[in-house]
Amino acid sequence: MGSPNPIPLAGPEQRQEQPWTPALLAFPWHCYRACPAHCQLPTLGQRTNSYCLPESGIPLHTKHGGRQSVTFAHIRPRKTNHQDRARSGDDRLFEQEDVAVKRDPVVVLNAPVSGLQPLSWSQDHRLAVCTTGSVSLMELVCDVHSNKQDLTLHRTSIPVPTDASRLRVGPSEELVCAIKKFSTHPDPTVKQVFLADRVMNPSLDVQRGIKYVSWSPLGCDVSGRCLLACLTLDHRLTIHNSHKRLEWNMLIDLTKKYGERLKERGYAKKDNKPPEADLLDFEELQRRFRMQTPLRMEWSSVYTIKQVQSDNTCKDVEMVLLAVLMENGDLVLWKFLLPFEKGADVVFYDLVESDVTRPNDLAWWEYENADRRMSGLIVGSEVGPVKIMPVSLSGVKGYFTLRHPVILWKECDEIAVENIKCVPMVHPIHKSNCSLIVASRGCYIFWCLLMISPAGLNVHNSHVAGLHSLPVISLAVSQHGVAVYTVSIDGWIKKLTPTFTENSLIFKPEDMLRPEDLIDRRIHGIAVSCNGAYIAMVSTQGMVDSYHPINRTYQVHFLTLKSPETAAALLLKSPTQNLYRMADLLDLVRWQILKNKCIPASLQEELDQKIQEVDSPYLWRFKLFLVRILYQSLQPPPTYHRWKPSRGASKVFVQDGEDGEGEEAAPQEGEPGGVKQDKDNQEEQMAEVQAWINTVETHLMRENMKKVLGVVYLNTWIAQNTSIPTCGLVEYLAKDSNDRASEVLIGHIKKKMNKQTFSERCNLCQAVLPFSDHKQAICQNGHMWLRCVLSYQACQTLTFRRCLLLDTIARLPEPEDPEWIKKILQAPCTLCDSPMI
Ligand SMILES: [Zn+2]
Ligand SMILES: [Zn+2]
């Protein structure tokens, strides 16, 4: 159970790490002061003691002036062979082992980073970076139209609002009196506290910048993507969604909404008793500010609830909760009905009073075992304690509520709890579900294992020490094949892999290799992509020639965490069966194909075999992706600059790009015959790959058409015009006489249609639109319309949606469409699984 005092040192696993450095650093954590020039490195003389480590390698405990401090060994970075290997160059890049390799581009930020955790990576592959000017967003796109080996990042941003916002605590005349009273208060303990408080004192400048951002789970907005909650340094908590590719919309200001709610209730506590004092009472003034100053916010996962409709039927509705931790320890829960479109869809859900003093960090604890599910909120404090507060989800099926708060760490040891993360895991020995909670406390990693058995809740906790000699500033968890990544301000990144024993957990530490251009840089934060393919880190210059640079630039670097082989293996056995969710892993495979100009034989073999076993659209989409990238890899690189006038050939200036390329590229001297043959070969190969793409695309299209026809069959009772080109689809499918399944389906449909046909007509000339191609429809007068990839209707409107990878289009649902057509139109892209936006 609870960890004894002093904090236990590195587990036995870590002591086995050999060799130790001969010197042991004694680090009196409590006396630690950062360098006044903010380099955060301890100043000389702060490393007060150093002892020789006995041969045995047993660390020492010392006491400093009655305060306990921890002495620990500094583990020398292990020179593993993969470290040497990565240095030896690119040729060994694609070995089976997971090696950290730097990916281009390095993204330069326009403004310094700000806030608590500057990086956050969403489930829909968008990386948010908090800066003083805006939230800078980078979307990782698995581009199928480019042959560049760099990561394709689409950059957008949400600017910090320019108008200042102040919290409202009561009548303005009363507040003016209070400000006057406390800023000139005779008692310095009141006056100083008031004057130094940025929230209360209006004469202090408000800080501009983003304090924290949090991504909702996937599927919360109208196009099935993530919502972004943003908290500014002046305490404005807003919810945003992305519209199309470049725009971000602010949907609601929750700080304002909560302020209005508090005003209506007379700033009462949860018990609803009106406060006895007014604003001229200092404690009351402080209380009213603290109860609505948000510190952090976190989204829950998506829950399904039953909602009673007006006709007394029940309907399953999805919702997500946003928990907001306030400065007084209150947890305010907002309920968002999904898909979240407008501010009215958010309602106040609950208020939980955690009574944590100086709260600091927040995370959801969500536990599931068989049919038993539980939720809670983990709250950490600046002074040390960590606990789980019960959250009651009464409307959700299968939910149990914790009876009491669960204390995970109770000592007030003045070591702040930061970076709390909670991951569900399966205990391999007990074969039961459990939760692993990790957090950083100073230079230690606090962990806690929660297991629920018939006897009750078991809590195991401890600290991992000896990893970092400076405070951990950022911590990221990779979910599948759990690994914890920690980084301290000096830039050392460690990887911790948890291993279960009968009763506890051991963490295996490893040093992560840093590419050369990241050494000596000061790291501000790290984040791991959704499936653990990449780690992003934001950094700035460290000391330059032992001086602090006058101007700093902030950069985001990307490193791989998995090899393309591991990524391919994970993609093949993915339980989600959704290519888009796996986009970060897919990008690793894409990179490998572009580099080697071929699909790895083993991957192709295994994929074909899997398709033989289970003929799922997911596997076909994966195959289509591989072939499309192969096609891109065969594209010749552009060999001339289009903007430069070509020398001595001004007459061919207006030539077509594609025709011109080869001729321009061909060298004047040498063997023109050989070059021509190469070119022919390449063209032949590209034609072959193009044919392959068409075959796979056609297969996917036919399968989807059958699905759509199946839905049409189920939802029409008599022959009726469904607006879906049923006859066209039937004829198109009938062309292939080897497809038994479609023959049966066509037979059924024809019976129902009863020889009636409803043809689509061109909006411009009323001519019949034939169904000759699944991509487009052309009427006899030459009007061309693109076909929707989901419903196969011709899109005869000005607005439609395109999939994220821009390979298909889809119609927008119309209000007069029946529910089942609306449902068809909600699906992701048939060819690539990406959302339609
Ligand atoms: Zn027409
Ligand atoms: Zn697509």
Image (cartoon, rainbow, N blue to C red):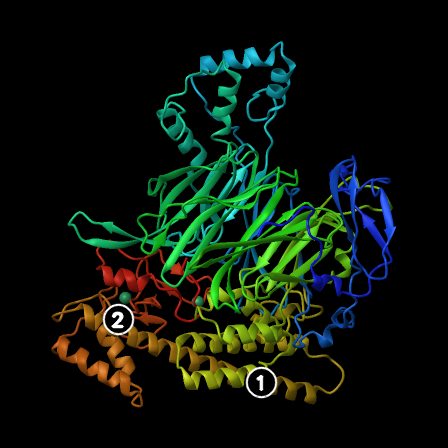
Give me the residue at 23% from left, 67% from top.
Answer: 761
- Residue 374's x, y, as percent? 41, 53
* Mark 2: amino acid: Leu
How many callouts does the rendering have?
Answer: 2
Give me the residue at 57% from left, 76% from top.
Answer: 659
The circle drawn on residue 601 is 1
In the image, residue 816 above or below residue 150: above
- Residue 635's x, y, as percent? 59, 76
Residue bearing the label numbered 2: 769
| Quadrant of the frame with the C terminus | bottom left
721 with respect to 333 (left or right): left
Location of residue 380 by image quarter: top right
Which residue is the extreme one toward the front? 455
Q: State the residue in front, 32 or 316.
A: 32
Location of residue 62 by image quarter: top right
- Residue 58's x, y, as percent? 79, 57
527 with respect to 790 (left or right): right
Query: Badges 2 and 1: C-beta atoms under 8 Å apart?
Result: no
Crowd around label 2: few <14 · some 14–19 · many ≥20 (10 Å): many
As measured in the structure, the alpha-carbon distance from the residue carrying label 2 to the one carrying label 1 is 44 Å
Secondary structure state at the residue bearing disc 1: helix
Secondary structure state at the residue bearing disc 2: loop
Give me the residue at 27% from left, 60% from top.
Answer: 822
